[in-house]
Amino acid sequence: MSDKARRLFEARDLNGDGLLTREEVIVALRTKGPSLAATGVLPSWGVQDADASSALFDAADQNGDAALTFEEFTAVVDRRFGWS
């Protein structure tokens, strides 16, 4: 697990419950995505629209419970962004 994935997860966990909902992923992308890209936490090409964020969520939600754990999130973003 990468430190960048941890920082990205925490930035998207808007209510601080240790899980990401689809809405948190989409809202955080819109509100925090540009600043995360500017500071190098997120690749600039990783700031995408709501549909792309929703697709990322679906790919990561391995157990289909509509919430992402840190482990589920990390498995996808580390691979997608080349952080592992």
Image (spheres, helix red, strand yellow):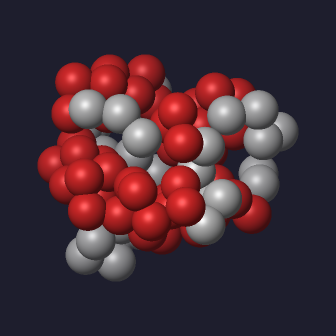
Across and down, in percent, residue 56 comes to: 40, 28
- Front residue of this view, candidates 33 and 60: 33
Tell which of 62 and 32 is nearer to you: 32
In the image as oriented, which residue stretches furthest toward the bottom? 16
Q: How many marks?
A: 0
Above or below for 73 versus 9? above
- Which quarter of the rendered picture does the C terminus lie within? top right
Residue 84 is left or right of residue 13, and the answer is right
Q: Residue at x 17, y 49 (%)?
A: 23
Report x, y in % for residue 6.
62, 63
Where is 78 relative to 55, above or below?
below
Does residue 66 appear in the picture of this structure? Answer: yes
Does 46 sit left or right of 6 as displayed?
left
Residue 72 visible in this rendered orientation of the protein: no
Q: Would you say 9 lies left or right of 49 here?
A: right
Indicate the position of residue 24 as horizontal and vertical percent values: 24, 55
Residue 74 image position (x, y, % from top left): 61, 44
Identified at 32% across, 25% down, the residue is 52
Residue at the spot 45% in from the left edge and 65% down from the top edge:
35
Could you say which quadrant of the image residue 63 lies in? top left
Q: Residue at x 53, y 55 (%)?
A: 37
Q: Is residue 72 above or below residue 42?
A: above
Quarter of the rendering containing residue 83: top right
Q: From the viewer's perspective, is 13 left or right of 37?
A: left
